Amino acid sequence: MEIKFYDEVDDGLLDFAVDAARYGEKWVFCKHRERDTYECPGGHREKGEDILETAKRELWEETGAVRYELKQLGVYSVIADGAETFGMLYYGEIHEFGALPPLEIERVELFDKLPDRWTYPEIQPKLIALTAQTCL
């Protein structure tokens, strides 16, 4: 598996949005109901959805965030099994959480340091590293 970063790609190629988010000085991670690992808020783009709307929807669905700022950082891709998929990385500063929607996320946890157990260990640590380098 290989991760690449791009300045831009055609909007139609963007399938995912990932929000590397913080609340105060802590990183925000989600624990899915069916896994014992942690992940950044984010997910698939719905048909006809603007990629920023994907980022906003996923941030709310997976954290309950109701007041926040999002900054677009850039395009990343994942190359695996001969296919390349593209996503947009955002940095989020969450100011207020509401109730967590009753969807796939069991709970939100705040971390001083990055978690040991990642859902996507080959991808998301690299996205967090870029975010920290760019925004912190």
Image (cartoon, helix red, strand yellow):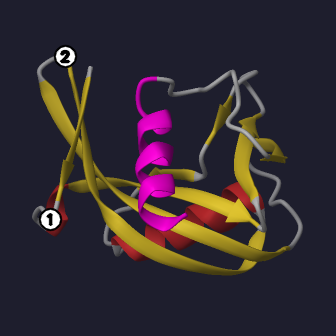
Q: Are the residues tagged 1 and 2 within 8 Å (C-beta)? A: no
Q: Amino acid at mark 2?
A: Asp
Residue 127 sits in quarter: top left
Q: Is residue 104 visible?
A: no
Identify which residue is drawn at 58% across, 69% down. 92
Rendered image: mark on residue 82 = none
Query: In the rendered structure, which segment of residues is drawn in magenta?
Result: 122-136
Compared to residue 76, the image places residue 37 above or below, namely above
Rendered image: mark on residue 8 = 1
Query: With 41 as the anchor, is 99 left or right in this view?
Result: right
Compared to residue 106, the image places residue 1 above or below, namely above
Q: Nearer the viewer, residue 27 or 37?
A: 27
Q: Nearer the viewer, residue 48 or 92?
A: 92
Q: Distance from label 1 to label 2 (Cα)?
A: 23 Å
Q: Which residue is mark 2?
A: 81
Q: Amino acid at mark 1?
A: Glu
Helix, strand or loop at label 2? It is loop
Compared to residue 43, the image places residue 70 above or below, namely below
